[in-house]
Image (tube, rainbow, N blue to C red):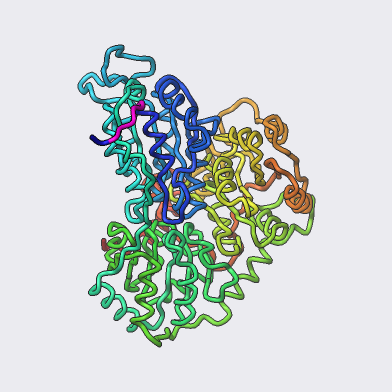
Amino acid sequence: MAETIRLTAAQAMTRWLAVQKTDGGERFIEGVWAIFGHGNVAGIGEALHGIGDALPTWRGQNEQSMAHAAIAFAKGHARRRAQAVTTSIGPGATNVVTAAALAHVNRLPLLIIAGDVFANRSPDPVLQQIEDFDDGTVSANDCFRPVVRYFDRITRPEHLLTALPRAMRVMTDPANCGPVCLAFCQDVQAEAYDWPAEFFEPRVWRIRRPEPDAAELAEVADLIRAAKAPVIVAGGGVIYSSAEATLAKFASRHNILVIETQAGKSALPQSDDMNYGAAGVDGSAAANAVAAGADLVIALGTRLQDFTTGSRTLFGDAKLVSINVQPFDAAKHGGVSLVADAKVALEKLGAALGDYRADAAAPGVRESWLRAVDAHCAAPVDSNELPADAQVIGAVQRATGADAIAMCAAGTMPGALKLLWQPSQHGYHMEYGYSCMGYEIAGAMGLKLARPDREVICFVGDGSYMMMNSELATAVMRRIPFTVVLTDNRGYGCINRLQAGTGGAPFNNMYVDSNIEVQPQIDFVAHAASMGAHAIKAANIAELEAGIAAARSRDIPTVIVIDTTAAPGPGDGLEGAGHWWDVAVPAVGDTEKLRVAYAEYLENAARQRLVN
């Protein structure tokens, strides 16, 4: 008779997770972020306590921000390691739905172990239970279904025998990677079961590299050979495939210029001569000029989001090739698909292309752009003037070393950093798939856990800071050092500019334009310091640079607050920077400003490439 081990379902889950490894030899789920409540404290909590350092548990301050930290950790490890988050039932679980959507959009692994109602229904309805009048199987955790790659409700202990391997399969699959939710009924967590001993044998999950189809490969190689001015759009798939060196060699050998998406930025360092910088809505003059002049666009590991394509107006009539490990992404925009791992695809294409070299050249364009960026990011002549975001970015660039990673998520700074930050390789971490305000501070903590060897600079606006800042306290408690540059423009400056740019009147974005009795005077320094961070106010750019340098000596987060102007935007005054973005403008309105904005909208929308 086969050997068995009697454990509760929760004990079995933690024991199994502790021995799942990737082909790098490390445990895939590094540990578990936990806020305990009813629904996970008795079962999962006891199991996590019992397993100890074999699967560490960390306490956070908010379920959503714990998940943000876990997501940033996975992104920092290029999806080769991940973390789990466990919650109670009800609001504890639904707090994670936003983070699950973030992981889903960005194709990042996250294990959500959400407490659920009683499978036996004996005490129904329990505290925080959602009751569907027409469906007895529904719980609050069904909210996760549209925002995870795999969902399973554990209503019997033996369900884990299939659910756990399925969860790992999803999180380690480069094509299907994303968040997993195991809705774990609270009574089932505590039930005992005789588990096959072999279930707990260590297992290695290999990150596969799908090979391209021969016919697809030949077609794409023919298209590249026929092109005179191809351009590569490098996406996050380059980094997740560890294809950075392969891309650099391929681009140089075949003289194909490279432009970047938010997720792909820093796959090549800015110093690489083939790197023409950011593409699209928040793109550089150099990158967008190259894109507009291309006769073939090679989308490499990108899902072709609207910011990358200029809402489908940037690439004109160029033919599109899409190389992606996920067929869904490879087939977008009517492109010619090459479904394969990015690194393998480049290697195979390189062999097929032989000595082919593109004719395209853009003499001086890249260098001229970088000189313009340096001038745009220079310190204000008058140190008493409020600096613009571009000048803050310039100060941070000057004050940090080559190992610095700039990270952000929402507001003005993502576009500004994509446009202006000049990273070393892997010196950029942006959550812009979901552009989730509140990701920044928790994300910086998770990123620093993943990359303790790098200096992490978190850019956050006052609006995002107000949404979610409590993991500063966690970073202080765990002695996780990173630097927060908090730019205070007294409202939602980015959306205020968008509102004005689409014909609207200033309304409900800046505090001064909001329906409030008193303008807030928020002391961000005192607030951050109250959580234990080292916090200072920089009066000008020089003090900001000094504060960043001093932060490197600390073992806790440093928060540097600096007042900035709400206008102009980071690319204003940079000739050729940026591109049109499709934000629908009201067709009817009472102002001349709105009528002009709508006419411009119709003119731009007529250029959209609508073939799918």
Is 178 in front, or is 113?
113
In the picture, residue 233 is in which quadrant? bottom left
Magenta-tinted stretch: 3-8
What is the count of numbered marks? 0
Is 218 in front, or is 440?
218
Q: Is residue 289 above or below residue 282?
A: below
Q: Residue at point 33% right, 27% down?
A: 6
Q: Is residue 562 left or right of residue 497?
A: right
Q: Quadrant of the N terminus?
A: top left
Pinpoint residue 191: horizontal percent, then vertical percent. Answer: 32, 22
Q: Is residue 186 above or below residue 297?
A: above
Dominant SS of magenta comes to: strand
Q: Is residue 233 above or below residue 121?
A: below
Q: Is residue 85 above or below residue 297?
A: above
Pinpoint residue 212: horizontal percent, then vertical percent. Answer: 29, 69
Is 299 in front, or is 65?
65
Pinpoint residue 511: horizontal percent, then vertical percent. Answer: 60, 35
The reply to whether the magenta stretch includes residue 139 is no
Q: Residue at point 36% right, 81% down?
A: 351
